[in-house]
Image (tube, helix red, strand yellow):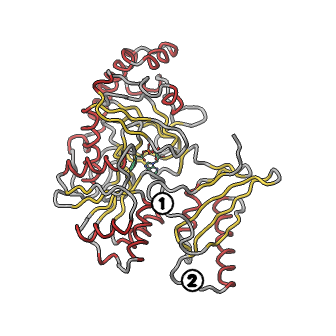
Amino acid sequence: MGIWNKKYETMSRSELEQVQLERLQKTVKRVYDNVEMYRERMDKAGVKPEDIKTLADLAKLPFTTKDDLRDQYPFGLLAVPLDEVTEIHASSGTTGKQVIGPMTENDVELWAEIAARSLAAMGVEKNDVVHTSYGFGLFTGGFGAHYGARKIGAVAIPMSSGNSKRQIKFMKDLGSTYLCCTPSYAMSLAEVLYDMGYTKDDINLKGGVFGAEPWTEEMRKEIEDKLGIKAYDIYGLTEIIGPGVSYECTEQAGMHINEDLFIPEIINPDTGEVLPEGSMGELVFTCITKEAMPLIRYRTRDLCVLTKETCKCGRTLARMAKPVGRTDDMLIIRGVNVFPSQIEEVLMRTDGVAPYYQIVVDRVNNKDTLDILIELSSFGMSDEVKDIEALTRKLSAELLSMLGIKANVKLVEPKSITRSEGKAVRVIDNRKLH
Ligand code: DLL
């Protein structure tokens, strides 16, 4: 399948490292000269731009955190004068705090480039019809997919999210071949398709560009079956640029990181120590070509594993596995670490339940409680109380073996859990621990 930028996507590791080093040196000098916070931090750490002589010297530089972005809000981390900024996006703040991503015209061009690399890797070509149901607005999902589709020369349809019946109508009428949205919204759209009396045979979709939230392999299968497509994962974050920081190719074997533009590291989230290839840890990015707000060693809080092995597709860029969650997503329930993705994995492989669920955590008499509300599937499930009891017992046992703690499983009526149009909110923590 199409490799959009053969030069950079298939460069040898030694050439790539040379490119990375030159770009890193330039960026570090630029932020040292233009961003007070970086100059102060580097002075304090006793590092000067000229001390960055090899890529390993990256580890000498201080980290940047989400708190730094908040402290420097809105323009403290700008490395260019404000009049060079041409677009600003912001994160939806699922963790409650607003961060912004200012861009110069070259940064917007870079974003279109990485989005084009991503879509091309998933098979999008000039004659495709790209239906974007990510939100358009401050969120980077909509514009990212749109700029990428336009750059490839495909037909770009900026649907935005919501009004699902209208989405299906357009998808049918315009013969959309690729759907771009969150995986949870893809599930909702599939449901609406069938509710409207259609099946996958009534639409023309070939592929899906799904990201912005964690999702499991089981959910991928479910979406692929329901929509009759190949479902691909795409990753990114507002602070760095938006969708396309990394992307799957048709091998579906991890997301290729645009390493010529962003240097990834995996660190131990507790100590900050850089971990060897193959270790699970927190993903950190350094922007080496961005102009407006090039972040140095930005701690994403996403937990994943990297590999530098060349992919079967020929790309040499490192790949990241699906993030298992975020350091701030992790629930600690009765002292045990629980990731929502572990719960999803169990639900998705169990017949009789729909992939809609909500995790409710509370504290009663100083003891944590974990309730998992799971929708019964509308197909193939009888109303017999004994069947429901058996299903509840089965799910409880599987969740116990996956999580190591007991969850209180509550099966609820089909369609009773609110459907997502963007990033799904699956955890309600009522413990008020902060
Ligand atoms: O979610 C950008 C994006 C839009 C990516 C569309 C992909 C598609 P933010 O709103 O700033 O940006 O949220 C970034 O979302 O740190 C991850 O925790 C999570 N995330 C993004 N993509 C994935 C993914 C956009 N494919 C935060 N898998 C990130 C798991 C993801 N988590």
Please identify the quarter of the rendering in which residue 198 is found.
bottom left
- Residue bearing the label numbered 1: 420
Mark 1: few/some/many CA within 10 Å (<14, 14-19, 20+): many
Q: Earlier in the sequence, mark 1 or mark 2?
A: 2
- Residue bearing the label numbered 2: 381
Could you tell me if residue 216 is visible in this image? yes
- Residue 132 in the image, given as x and y percentages of width and height: 31, 56
- Report the front residue among 218 and 59: 218
Residue under the point 39% across and 66% down: 164
- Residue 199 in the image, given as x and y percentages of width and height: 35, 78
Residue under the point 35% across and 35% down: 88
What is the three-letter code of the residue carrying label 2?
Met
What is the three-letter code of the residue carrying label 1?
Ser
Q: CA distance from mark 1 to mark 2?
A: 24 Å
- Report the front residue among 249 and 133: 133
- Per the image, label 1 sits on a secondary structure element best described as loop
